Amino acid sequence: MGKKVSNSVLRNLVANTGDLAALPTTVVDLLYIFKEADASVQGVVNILHRDPAMTANVLKLSNSAFYGSRRKITSVQEALVMLGNRAVVTMAFASGMAPVMRRDLDGYNVSRSRFWNHSILAASAASFASDKMGFPQHKCEAFTAGLVHDVGMLVIDAYLVSNGKNLVTAEPAFDVSGAERRLLGFDHCEAGAMLADNWGFPGVLHDSIKYHHDPQLAGEGQDVVRSVAVGNLLAMIIEQDLDPHTDPLVRGILKKLDLEADFVAGLRADLGGDLDSIVAAALSSEPCPA
């Protein structure tokens, strides 16, 4: 089993995360807009114009959202008009976090594409879940929170690799937190919440990271946290091709979330196509509040 790592060690790990210690400037600026919830059009335009790659990704997603339309979106201003400030900020945040999160997790034996794809799929599913569970006003927050729900694995992976440890286990992916706690004394939820504090994430993102396996413990942002829990579950169902009606692990989690298998099966039907199409659909089916 090995000696368990103390929470003081976790604090030191998070405080010395190397390239994870600071987010890109554009992402920090977008977080300010996210927290203030009163983004001006010009403020969003100014941020995106400083980052050509981010702008290109936003326009690509915006045109995916309006695939088949005669009008092609060619500027950030047009995207803001067509999709709304909040949806564009959410797309930009996802683009800005890609370089931070798209990395191999060798300690978990997870490739960068698998980790990023899971994050994007969980984010999109969380947005759809928020809408279907009666919280459409929170769908952009749910997407953003779903995107970063597993960032704690980045911290733990650094520790695992530097200490020659590996967390590949025969246990189901649903119990990765249990495996982490048995090996280390803490899990990716705790590590991620601490990293979120260091990054200056708003409370709803912090709580979604910390409680996405136990949304009933969250505070005022519980609707978003619950949406993220559903999104994470749905991503796993899709990735492992599980039947929510018959798989005992899925049924146990659904009971904990007080949801029916038919609800998750219906959400799964919404998540078809490539990732860009899924993201575009998640953020454009009902525009997020401005």
Image: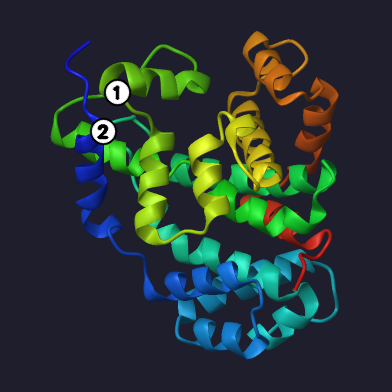
Viewport quadrant of the C terminus: bottom right
Residue 15 higher or lower than 50, as above or below: above
Which label belongs to residue 7? Answer: 2
The local secondary structure at tag 1 comes to: loop
Q: Is residue 75 visible?
A: no
Foreground label between 2 and 1: 2
Residue 66 location, x and y as percent? Answer: 79, 69
The local secondary structure at tag 2 comes to: helix
Q: Name the kind of residue labelled 1 in the image.
A: Gly
Tags 2 and 1 touching, CB below 8 Å: yes
Residue 270 higher or lower than 51, as above or below: above
Residue 76 location, x and y as percent? Answer: 64, 84
Residue 94 higher or lower than 36, as above or below: above
Task: Tell me what residue is drawn at x 77 percent, y 23 percent.
Answer: 258
The mark that comes first in sequence, 2 or 1, is: 2
In front here: 235 or 192? Answer: 192
Which label belongs to residue 185? Answer: 1
In front here: 21 or 164? Answer: 21
Viewport quadrant of the N terminus: top left
> Whole-Å distance between the Cαs marked 2 and 1?
8 Å
